[in-house]
Amino acid sequence: MKAHPLLVWYGTGAELLVYVDAQSSMFKARAFGEVLAADLVRRTSAKPQSQSFFHRVEALYAEGTLTPEVYAALARLRDTGNQAVHDHLGEVRHALELLRTCFELGEWFHRALTGDRTPIGFVPPTPPARQVPASVAAALKAEIDRYQQELAETKLLLAGKASLDQARADATVAAERAVRDSEARRDETAALVASLKTAAEAAQQAFDAEPATKVSAAKREEFIANARRASRAPLNEAQTREEIDRQLGAAGWVVQDERDLNLYAGTGVAVREVRLATGRADYLLYVNERRVGVIEAKREGTAPRGAEAQLDRCRSGLTAAQKLNAWPREKPLPFGYVATGTETTFVNGLDPFPRTREVFAFHQPETLARWMREAENNPAAPTLRARLRQLPELDRLGLRPAQIEAVQGLEKSLAEDRPRALVQMATGAGKTFTAVTASY
């Protein structure tokens, strides 16, 4: 089931009228919320007491489709007609706030339907010079500047930029370009909305008359789960870095800028934005004053596994001077992470066949230090996965043939880097003794 076209109609209409007819803009914003609430009711088979906007929102909240934040946003649209605004400037400010609310709800709905976590960013409409008094436009400047700054944050891309300042400057330019492009399309959008008026009225009548359709329990639960996950807005790149800093600190790492480098500040030091021979590492990891790994930070919405090639370039991209303090020397750095602030994947280059896997958190520096000692003490089998290839010979004394087959099959599976295995045995075949033997 796709999103209803009336959402586009009312949202676009609210944007076109926000400065020239604030009351009509607020009416369309409220209509946007009504259509969205009705659409959500049909997707979840919610049972409101009536088909009013109020009861639909209450029913959706009661059954768990709406988080408190989404519920509050819909309530703002719902209560629009009950708020008295006594001056034009106040009306415009309120209409602009509700337009932003429509955008946030639309973005949330898009994430719930598609799972897309790419930050989009609200593009604040520019007051049309010929239709809005200069005094009103000047009074709104602070709000519009704030929205534009938030838009720039969503467009912040640090990869490939010489510095954070350069990245922020480029993001500001991109935000200004988005605002100009939106302004240039205003007349085109207005003409399109006018041409679709009759079709929209017919669509509204059809929408109101459309009977409720039965939704399977599985579809309903899936949509509600997606909607609740989508209620948390995706992180932009600046927020991603802040969250990675926090996660590193929680794992025991001391996070520093390169200009403030102090390798004796802790067992593990994570240094931001370090220049390598092959580019720049978002974070370079030190354990006991030795370079041991890197972190590639990606904005949310980027699949961490898609950044593996870039991670490999960083792990093997030390300069000649940096290799002098690397562990192990003359080899790629063993430990690599790709992180988005919400997902983290890890690769251990010491494994026989290194591959990335998802982890719950960054490892503690002490954990990496222990792995380093184990690798130095046993170069032939430096990691757990390597040691699983060298298990001792199974003592078959007292074991039944089925038990021997099960344990040897499990050992073979582990040696092939298969972390999950299923052993199926008949009742009375000795499953408990098999499990104990395999564990031993």
Image: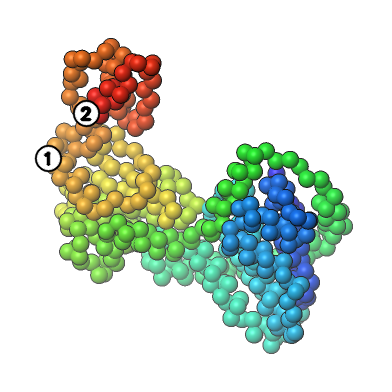
Mark 2 / mark 1, whichever is N-terminal: 1
The quarter of the picture where residue 147 lies is bottom right
- Split into 4 quadrants, where in the image is the N terminus? top right
Coordinates of residue 404 in the picture (x, y in percent) = 27, 16
Quadrant position of the C terminus in the picture: top left
What is the x, y in percent for residue 291?
A: 21, 54
Is residue 7 in view from this perspective? no
Identify residue for label 2.
Answer: 440
Q: Amino acid at mark 2?
A: Tyr
- Determine which residue is flagged by label 1: 377
Q: Amino acid at mark 1?
A: Asn
355 relative to 92, above or below: above
Query: Total label count?
Result: 2
Q: CA distance from mark 2 to mark 1?
A: 22 Å
Label 2's element? loop
Return the x and y of residue 2 as percentages of the image width and height. Answer: 70, 46
| Residue at horizontal 24 percent and vertical 60 percent from the top | 269
Tell whether label 1 touches label 2 (CB within 8 Å).
no
